[in-house]
Amino acid sequence: MILGDVLGTPVHDGDGNRLGRVADARFVIDGAPGQLMAGARLFGLVVSPHSAASFLGYERTGLTQPWPLARILRWRHRGSFLVQWHDIAMIGPDSVALRADFTRYDPALPKRAGGG
Amino acid sequence: MKKLLGLALGVLTAIGGFVDIGDLVTNAVVGSRFGLSLVWVVLVGVVGICLFANMSGRVAAASGRATFEVIRERLGARAGLANLGASFIINLMTVTAELGGIALALQLASSVQYLLWIPVAVVAVWIVIWRVRFAIMENVAGLLGLCLVVFAVALFLLKPDWANLAGQALAPAVPGSETGAGYWYYAVALFGAAMTPYEVFFFSSGAVEEGWSVKDLGQARSNVLVGFPLGGLLSVSIAACAAVVLLPAGVAVTSLSQVVLPVAEGGGKLALAFVIVGILAATFGAALETTLSSGYTLAQFFGWSWGKFRRPVQAARFHLSMILCLVVGVGVLATGVDPVLVTEYSVVFSAIALPLTYLPVLIVANDPQYMGHHVNKRPVNVLAMIYLVIILAASVAAIPLMIITGAGS
Amino acid sequence: MNPDGPLSPHPPVAGRVLDAQLHLLDRQVLDADGVPVTTADDIEIDGLEAGVPIPPGAPAPSLTALLTGPVLGTRIFGGRPPSSRLIRILWKDVADVGIVISLGVRGGSLDADWVERWVRDKIIARIPGGRHDPR
């Protein structure tokens, strides 16, 4: 499956209510070790209720400068949350459905995140 | 001497940005119609481009990533492609104009027909891009372009009324023969000409070509602080010469020969020779800068291998795309279009495309993953945010002003 | 389910975390010598079928490859090129992810490099001086 088909699609909960759009997909490098990097498993999806365009990443990284931009972009992504893989019921061609009892997690990147 | 040559990148970038063929004519037009009442715009533009180019140069030195790689990564594929489309078309228009400008300068020097010089110009530009080392290219074009300082010399030799000139500059007012809309149209055009995105594409890619790293951050700053104010000074000298000679006589500037008229009047044949060498070097330098920028932007967006520091076979798509740009440029010029008119439009469109180029650079200059601890300091960020507002204002006002004033006519 | 309550803290993870859009997509991909190969235009994951309900306890899909080439056009405008036409950079060839994605292999051995090789061999190498070292 190609990730570009999933990013930006609407996300619904168990009752069919729309929760937002898929803003990003989170992977964890803890799979089978390889020669170079270990395998990357899908950990979950980041859902944003207001805007799927998360191109500047302010809502998840600790960046606070320049502060007017940081404030505006964090406001645009208010209410974003992370859902884990086991809470996803179906990733369909045009939308994502979550299980009835899913948990919303803080989407901020944990300390060991990212590149470099 | 080595230290002076180390400033060549900044000087060449500024020459290509401030005194290319379009700006040469626009500055003379502005001087002949508005006197020095728009000098404050050049000042605002110089500070802006110093800020912008310094940030992009620092990002390139600290992280090794040139500006369009940053734009693609921050804006994503869709907005990045829109930016690429706009920037590429503007670049292509400017390449076309500069090739025409080289031919015009050669015509001025030799009285041989302009169209005959076009093949010479394009072959010469291509050979330099294909074969000449980046450092040699920037040193020669930058140094010879400085001959344009003869405009400032001629200004002194013309013995103008300095008080009058200072009055025009320090107490700007729209002259009676012009409209307010016309004044602001040229203000946006001058601002767009000072802050053209290709200057930043070229400067940051040039930083990578030169192999600048974190220890060269001081050199990057010197390049910016010497090059762009120098470019601004040359711009103002051209406008001042036109204000002193052409404005009182009511001469309308439509060709290169009117632009150099004040220099001939002030300094005679010797000055004229210097100014022709300077114009030739400046338009040639601008042609190199914009052609390379076309290659840089495409290669950096699509992730191709690029750079004059690589053998052409190791940067094949980069060189092919530049060859195609030059071919298109010649094709357009062969239809007889006026190259100067082409740049006047492209400058205004640059003002529109500027915000989406500026914003990713500003963001990344604050990102510790790219910059380590060389992120923007607080005062720089404050100034940068002020300029973001100015840039957005110019971008929004550009098209309406162009329509209202009929492109300044 | 906590619709309007506070978000639960992030679960602990055993390895590095990478977000696709933030850390992987649209990044430059450099080969083992530092030469640019392409940009990461899309990502392929295995172990997941579109439109098929996921059984509880199913293992998480894994990232198999970075995609480049015509998939850029379809990512922006929609649609999908056929699987055989996708140009893949296998995840097992990736050595590190930072500001750029660094591979552990050389570009010459990759599918992703074929357009560059073609332009090089058919066009650039034929122009005199193409192999000249500029330094």
Image: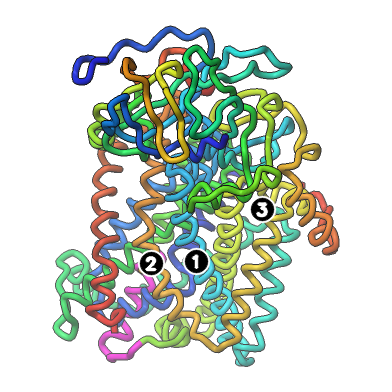
Query: Can you tell which quarter of the image residue C12 is in?
Result: top left
Mark positioned earlier in the residue sequence (1 or 3): 1
Q: Which residues are magenta?
A: B233-252
Q: Mark 3 = which residue? A: B134
Where residue B24 appears, as percent x and y from the top left, is 43, 74
Where residue B45 appears, as percent x and y from the top left, is 32, 57
Q: Mark 2 = which residue? A: B349
Distance between the Cα atoms at labels 2 and 3? 29 Å
Pointer 1 with pointer 2, Cβ within 8 A:
yes
Within the magenta stretch, is there residue B238?
Answer: yes
Q: Left of B198 or right of it: where is C81?
A: right
Residue type (three-letter) at the residue carrying disc 3: Phe
Where residue B333 appears, as percent x and y from the top left, is 57, 82
Q: Residues within 10 Å of mark 3 (few under 14, many from 20)?
A: some
Distance between the Cα atoms at labels 1 and 2? 10 Å
Residue B58 visible in the shown view? no
Residue displayed at 73% across by 58% down: B132
Residue displayed at 51% across by 86% down: B337
